[in-house]
Amino acid sequence: MAAVISDFPRYPEWADAMKSVEVLEEYEDGYAATVRFVIDAGVMADDYTLAYEYADDLSRIEWHLVEPSKTQKSQRGSYDLADGGDGTTTVTYTLEVELSIGMLGMFRRKAEKMIMDTALKQLKRRVESLPAS
């Protein structure tokens, strides 16, 4: 699961809104440190850069927005991965986005939930489509 999540250049193959993804900087171990995303989700298009950090055992991948973008003031998120012991992985995805335009809290939370639900559904579909390793 962590391998799919951290394979940023392949996101446009399976994440519908991703138009291009470019790793700008890597850690010594080859994992992405900063990544530039260009998205077009119909109602929202943006170009932004996220900085990533990883737990030593890759059980947690977290990120934050490097600098404000056209539509976002801030973004913080994480994937927490728990091995089910039976070949399955439980993924807990957290996301907090502050948009540049004002939005009532309940609408912001609904938008965050929609983004997370879509991302998890597409991630699951991607992982299940890959050959078992």
Image (tube, rainbow, N blue to C red):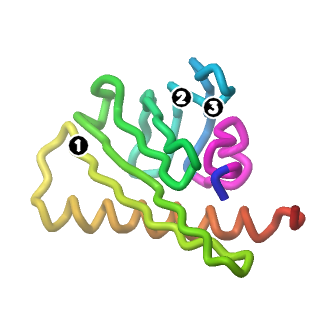
Between the residue at mark 1 and the residue at mark 3, the CA separation in whole angstroms equals: 28 Å
Q: Residue at x 59, y 29 (%)?
A: 32
Q: Does the magenta-highlighted stretch encompass residue 28?
A: no
Q: Identify the magenta region.
A: 3-16
Between the residue at mark 3 and the residue at mark 2, the CA separation in whole angstroms equals: 10 Å
Callout 2 amino acid: Val
Q: Is residue 100 left or right of residue 130?
A: left
* Marks 1 and 2, the one that precedes in the sequence: 2
Occupied quadrant, residue 84: bottom right
Callout 1 amino acid: Leu
Q: Position of residue 107 (x, y in %)?
A: 19, 64
Q: Is residue 102 left or right of residue 20?
A: left
Q: Residues within 10 Å of mark 3 (few under 14, many from 20)?
A: some
Q: Residue at x 21, y 44 (%)?
A: 98
Is 123 drawn above or below residue 87 in the view shown?
A: above
Q: Residues within 10 Å of mark 1 (few under 14, many from 20)?
A: some
Q: Which mark is residue 31?
A: 3
Q: Which mark is residue 127?
A: none
| Residue placed under numbered mark 1 in the picture | 99
Whether residues under marks 3 and 2 lie with C-beta atoms below 8 angstroms apart, the answer is: no
